[in-house]
Amino acid sequence: MPIRQFFPSLRPLHWALLAVLIGCALLPVIAAPIPGLADLPNHIARHHVFFHHGEDGPLDRYFDVEWRWIGNLGVDLPVLGLMHWMDAESATRIVVACIAPLMVLALLALSRAAHGRISASAMLAMPVIYHHAYMYGFVNYSLSVALGLLLFALWLARPPEGWRGALLYMLLSLAVWTAHMGGWSIMCVAAGFAELIRLRSPRDIVGAARRLWPLATPIVPLLLWRGEPTGAPLYIWTDQNIFWAKILNFITVMKGWSREADLAMTGAIGLLALLALFWAGRRRLDPRLAAAGVGVCLMATLMPTTMLGSWGADFRVAPAGVILLLLSISPAADPRRERLVFAAGLLLFVVRSVGIAASWHRASAVLERRLDTMLEAVPQGSRMGFIAVQSDCDYPWVLNPDRKLPGLAIARRDVFTNTMFKVDGADLMTIRDPRDRAVWYDLSEDVLPLCPVNAIDYPGLRQRTEEMARDRFDRIWIWGAPADRIPIPPGYRLLRASGEDVMIGR
């Protein structure tokens, strides 16, 4: 469908606004050579392994890759295409940089489809594109949400008609599912609740089913994929208080940049939404977007913490529900009040984009220096263990790639390290050695603090270094403990010490 379906009469001012929105959305990732998305180094490592697998290099000793069609390939596929011309880090940054601009387009398209124009409520929703799951670095999921909301906007504006329309929506739904099943699930729930609100009689069910069934096509590959026995549980509930945890999923919907800034911005958006509803004059809620938002929020509330191997399944969904509820607020009858809310939302988005970009840019320089210093002591193709020593019992608010930074050593040194993901049933890349596969994967890097005293667990650190020494790691990178307190196993010596980073080696 041509873009003029949503934006038929863009004037120069509109193009300028669109340029500002897209430019701000690009800024955080473009400004930082190492973006601050917490899990991104692991994605870069996977892309490097995917592309170079089978070249009979060091990586083939450590990793296997088995390609198959799964609902978790959104960033992987375009990155592998770009890697014919550039390295994994550059290709991944380019593709990841497109996620936030696609979310901007999705919000504008939804506003246009629901209200016939770009409303102030679209600006209120803009800052939420940097949501908790995005800041974690769940990039396949975040891309699929952007694509799913774009397809939902298209579906609202022009539901499938005839077999050609049904075929188009079937193919587009498969594309969203291939990016990540989470975005497809959100799209289906949103569309289902949007149809539910329109039902007036049993006869309407037939029409609703006709419009919805093409979106459900990915059920077939989902059953083929997840129907395989993996040994992983279907779902896992959080160990926390369930009621409070679900409330926190919405309170912390923008978690990841700065506790004070994130909570203040969440509060400001909430107040502006109330202002838009009760002060800006004769507003109403678009019933389709409001129902979609309620449905997705209900989905986030009812989902377990881990589902089909994906941790954080519930808090990932919450931002999409909040976005849809905000977008459902229709334009004000009073143009002056509409412009005021519009400008306030735009200002919040610019502040959040520039603030995150500045933070990531500063942090990226530090991360580069740490990598350069530590990797000088790491031979090509070696085994490098990583230990992240924690001394604070509070769960961190600011999300950054410190704990996953060694993933970049895979891309830069073709090493094996112990920070890589392990998701039963969703791993295209698996660790070859049985011992490594059973022990040395994501979370094995953590030495947790002694609580509630907020102290380093030195006996735990000693045990971890001795385990790595027994398993013949050539280098062990320890972050978070002073160099003079590092327990060095027999046969190892200190190679590098810089700040909170220490490298020991055989």
Image (cartoon, rainbow, N blue to C red):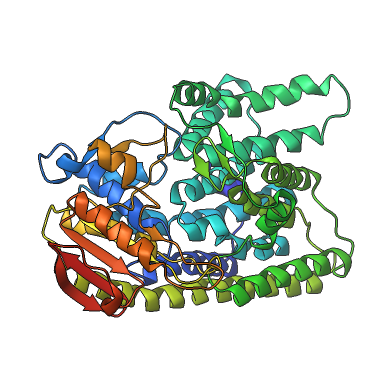
Q: Is residue 37 left or right of residue 87?
A: right
Residue at left offset 56%, top offset 42%:
306
Q: Is residue 472 above or below residue 179?
A: below
Q: Is residue 309 left or right of residue 401?
A: right
Q: Position of residue 73 (x, y in %)?
A: 40, 40
Q: Is residue 1 left or right of residue 27?
A: right
Q: Is residue 500 above or below residue 397?
A: below
The quadrant of the picture occupied by the C terminus is bottom left
Instruction: Indicate the quadrant where residue 465 lies.
Output: bottom left
Q: Nearer the viewer, residue 48 or 431?
A: 431
Residue at left offset 62%, top offset 54%:
107
Query: Can residue 426 be seen in this snapshot?
Result: yes
Instruction: Indicate the quadrant where residue 162 lies.
Output: top right
Instruction: Indicate the quadrant where residue 72 lies.
Output: top left
Q: Position of residue 288 (x, y in %)?
A: 76, 43
Q: Nearer the viewer, residue 214 or 32?
A: 32
Q: Is residue 230 above or below residue 187?
A: above
Q: Nearer the viewer, residue 259 or 145?
A: 259
The quadrant of the picture occupied by the N terminus is top right
Residue at left offset 14%, top offset 54%:
382
Query: Can residue 7 be seen in this snapshot?
Result: no
Residue at left offset 30%, top offset 40%:
437
Q: Position of residue 403 (x, y in %)?
A: 38, 62
